[in-house]
Image: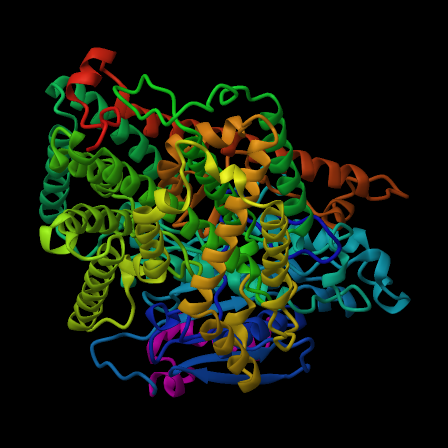
């Protein structure tokens, strides 16, 4: 279990994240089960509850209870899901499986399901799920082992194509302490231990080593093929550590356990099939995925050629941007290639354990407090800016000190990027009833982008004619953001993931946005220096020209998306969302010296009431977002147990409110929140600076040097699958439920479950996993950001790097 509590939020297999199948259509189950296929459930109430799990998933519904039915079926997408009650597997159920085992698709019982087949070239499949044992105890029937051997021998000897997959799970061990007298008389630990020892032996399964668990066919030509899969994990889903998933007598499960059991089976059956059919790696689930078979529809030659072209482009950009020797360029490229290869290993192999993102408020609060603590501590001990009251000093060869403005922007970028990544790590942006986390993350990412573009625009404007070659400066900036995503593509990191979380990142979105704005500033800024423009009133004339150019560019982007018949911006998503807020800082960069004399620090003369107002405004905006954007969606029975309950909403009112949420946060509201929050923060932060001898957060300022790399890599190195699951270098491990240990006589009489120790172990494992993953993420991001300076001494940097020279005196 990845959440240790009486009623857990989800179930975590050892090493991978379970995909949550929502409905037949939304989960693409049509790629796994085709018209004419039949899913058959045989057995008692333990089998029936799994049937209801399939029923709920296929229909996109959830129910708290279910009726006891002798026989029922449902049809979804021309796929038949059928339940036949046979508590001893020796009556109607056994006759049915014997008929199919002997005759395959020609069995008489298959006619109805086969009539739904719409493809004459397709042979429908049969999936069999079954269990039995509880009623043998209840009715004191002695020949359980012999009857089960008869059932499995029949399946093992089945004709070719009779069953696509067969699964058997042992009788559900009850929660012994919750049972009443009627049940406890026959379902005691000793009798349950006997039943489970029988089925364990039939599957050669060792419950301690977790070995065995399959039976093989007996046909001479197919002895290496699996006949039946064993599913003992169902007994581990609820016990004394997680009792609230039981019914009132502790014998059966209740929702969401039905759907959880169905999802475990569907992951095993369908994940690989859907991956191949969609030619995309799953995003929210990583179990049972064969990563080696990605790009099924591309030939090996075409993939190799595409990667060679991307590699040549990346090396060419490095050569053009740095003008270094090929040896040094190779060092840079090779280092980034190793980092990209590591991202490929963490995303598209099972090397590192992956855990579903499940928001936990306590975890978020603790991490947020730690973030504040380190920020304040690094601010208290920072003395790097106490001497920075001199006029602006710009970079020349990387040896000059930064100005107060530049250091403030660096700290601002570090704070914005780190908070953005923290929100995505804990899943605060995925909460169903509030979009506060989603809005905060959008504001923070827009802030970082604004600061990055603002820095580029200010350097470009202030340097004037001092650039050795403005084209080389533009090439360097473009190369800095383009090489990493190109190399990620070279090693084969997937850009999109099937079923990824809403708003997930990919490594193309941010570079596309930055390259556009670098190019926009580079191309439009020289136009503002035309003599015809100079005759007008500057900076109004420059503003007018920039706005007109921006509107024209935005129109062309819109028409380009429509031309390719796309209703979604795709890789231009960030550019479209933040277009007007980034344009605002481009315009602001033209007049900043008019409003504030940065060099002589005249901003200190701003009245105190302005700073107080800014502080109140920032506090109000944070609370506005945190408590106003709340959508009272109707509760679903599973809402507390699944991370994406929106997928299960079927009620018209719920869908209406969901659409309202999606449409309510429009570009105008985004513009207001981003601009106003950053204006308030900037004024408040500057007031703190001038009253604290210009102290900055050390880690915030220094991390800004690799925040771009961190934002690009966090969905693949800190999280995984585009930010859809969490990487955990500490394996979750396999847990043996206490009631299973009781049935095996492994616990002393009077044993009480150690809840305190259980929780401490869980928290320690989670803390250790976070420390390791965050350290790896920080190391990789730092290395990737600083690799550009490797292989050069200071003289080389002065002579070759296309950076701005010291600000020259203007006429």
Which secondary structure is most common in the magenta stretch?
helix
Side (left or right) of 408 relative to 810: right
- In which image quadrant can residue 788 be found? top left
- In which image quadrant can residue 597 be found? top left
Side (left or right) of 184 relative to 28: right
Relative to 739, say whether 320 is above or below: above
Give the residue drawn at x 52%, y 82%.
656
Of residues 554 and 482, which is closer to you in this image?
554
Of residues 644 and 152, which is closer to you in this image?
644
Residue 731 pos. (x, y %): 55, 37
Give the number of marks.
0
- In which image quadrant can residue 188 be found? bottom right
Specify whether residue 645 is in view.
Answer: yes
Is 103 in the magenta?
yes
Where does the magenta region start and end?
A: 89-115
Relative to 491, say whether 494 is above or below: below
Residue 757 pos. (x, y %): 78, 36
């Amino acid at each position: 279990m990845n959440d240790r509590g009486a009623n857990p939020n989800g179930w975590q297999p050892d090493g991978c994240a379970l995909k949550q199948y929502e409905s037949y259509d939304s989960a693409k189950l049509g790629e796994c089960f085709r018209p004419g296929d039949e899913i058959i459930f045989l057995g008692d109430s333990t089998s029936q509850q799994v049937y209801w799990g399939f029923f709920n998933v296929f229909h996109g519904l959830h129910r708290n209870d279910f009726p006891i039915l002798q026989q029922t079926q449902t049809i979804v997408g021309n796929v038949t899901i059928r339940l036949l009650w046979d508590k001893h597997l020796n009556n109607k159920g056994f006759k049915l499986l014997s008929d199919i085992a002997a005759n395959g698709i020609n069995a008489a019982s298959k006619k109805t399901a086969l009539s739904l087949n719409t493809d004459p070239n397709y042979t429908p499949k049969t999936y069999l799920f079954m269990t039995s044992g509880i009623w043998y105890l209840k009715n004191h029937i002695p020949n359980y082992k012999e009857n089960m051997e008869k059932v499995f021998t029949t399946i093992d000897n089945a004709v070719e194509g009779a069953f696509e997959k067969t699964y058997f799970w042992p009788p559900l061990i009850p929660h012994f302490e919750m049972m009443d007298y009627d049940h406890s008389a026959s379902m005691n630990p000793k009798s349950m231990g006997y039943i489970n020892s029988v089925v364990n032996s039939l599957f050669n399964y060792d419950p301690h080593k977790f070995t065995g668990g399959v039976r093989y066919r007996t046909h001479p030509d197919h002895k290496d093929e699996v006949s039946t899969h064993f599913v003992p994990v169902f007994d581990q889903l609820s016990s004394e550590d997680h009792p609230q998933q039981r019914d009132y007598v502790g014998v059966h499960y209740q929702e969401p356990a039905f759907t959880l059991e169905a999802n475990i089976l569907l992951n095993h059956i369908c994940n690989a099939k859907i991956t191949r059919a969609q030619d995309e790696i799953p995003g929210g689930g990583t179990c049972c995925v064969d990563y080696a078979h990605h790009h099924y529809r591309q030939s090996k030659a075409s993939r190799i050629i595409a990667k060679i072209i991307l590699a040549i482009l990346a090396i060419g950009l490095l050569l053009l941007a740095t003008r270094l020797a090929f040896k040094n360029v190779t060092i840079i490229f090779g280092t980034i290639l190793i980092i990209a290869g590591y991202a490929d290993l963490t995303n598209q192999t099972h090397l590192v354990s992956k855990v579903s993102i499940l928001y936990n408020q306590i975890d978020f609060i603790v991490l947020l407090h730690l973030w504040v603590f380190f920020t304040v501590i690094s601010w208290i001990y920072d003395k790097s800016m106490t001497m920075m009251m001199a006029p602006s000093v710009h970079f020349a060869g990387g040896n000059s000190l930064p100005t107060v403005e530049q250091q403030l922007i660096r700290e601002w970028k570090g704070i914005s990027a780190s908070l953005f990544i923290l929100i995505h790590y804990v899943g605060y942006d995925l909460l169903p009833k509030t979009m506060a986390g989603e809005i905060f993350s959008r504001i923070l990412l827009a802030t970082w982008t604004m600061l990055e573009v603002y820095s580029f625009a200010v350097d470009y404007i202030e340097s004037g004619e001092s650039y050795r070659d403005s084209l080389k400066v533009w090439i360097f900036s473009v190369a800095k953001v383009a090489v990493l995503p190109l190399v990620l593509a070279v090693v084969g990191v997937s850009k999109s993931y099937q079923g990824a979380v809403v708003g997930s990142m990919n490594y193309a979105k941010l570079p596309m946005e930055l390259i556009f704005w670098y190019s926009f500033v580079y191309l439009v800024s020289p136009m503002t220096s035309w003599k015809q423009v100079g005759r007008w009133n500057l900076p109004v004339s420059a503003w007018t020209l920039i706005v007109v150019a921006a509107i024209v560019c935005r129109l062309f982007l819109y028409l380009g998306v429509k031309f390719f018949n796309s209703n979604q911006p795709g890789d231009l998503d960030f550019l479209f969302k933040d277009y007007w807020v980034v344009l605002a800082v481009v315009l602001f960069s033209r007049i900043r010296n008019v409003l504030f004399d940065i060099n002589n620090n005249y901003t200190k003369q701003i009245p105190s009431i302005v700073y107080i107002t800014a502080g109140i405004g920032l506090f109000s905006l944070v609370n506005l977002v945190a408590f106003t954007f709340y959508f009272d969606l109707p509760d679903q029975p599973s809402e507390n147990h699944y991370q994406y309950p929106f997928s299960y909403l079927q009620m018209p009112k719920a869908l209406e409110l969901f659409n309202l949420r999606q449409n309510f946060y429009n570009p105008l509201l985004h513009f207001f929140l981003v601009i106003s929050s950053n204006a308030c923060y900037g004024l408040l932060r500057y007031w703190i600076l001038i009253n604290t001898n210009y102290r900055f957060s050390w880690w915030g300022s220094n991390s800004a040097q690799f925040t771009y790399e961190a934002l690009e890599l966090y969905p693949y190195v800190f999280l995984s699958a585009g930010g859809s699951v969490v990487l955990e270098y500490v394996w979750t491990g396999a847990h043996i439920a206490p009631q299973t240990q009781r049935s095996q006589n492994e616990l002393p009489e009077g044993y009480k479950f150690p809840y305190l120790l259980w929780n401490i172990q869980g928290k320690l494992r989670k803390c250790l996993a976070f420390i390791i993953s965050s350290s790896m993420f920080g190391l990789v991001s730092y290395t990737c950001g600083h690799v550009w300076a490797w292989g050069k001494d200071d003289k080389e940097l002065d002579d070759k790097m296309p950076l701005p020279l010291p600000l020259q005196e203007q006429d």
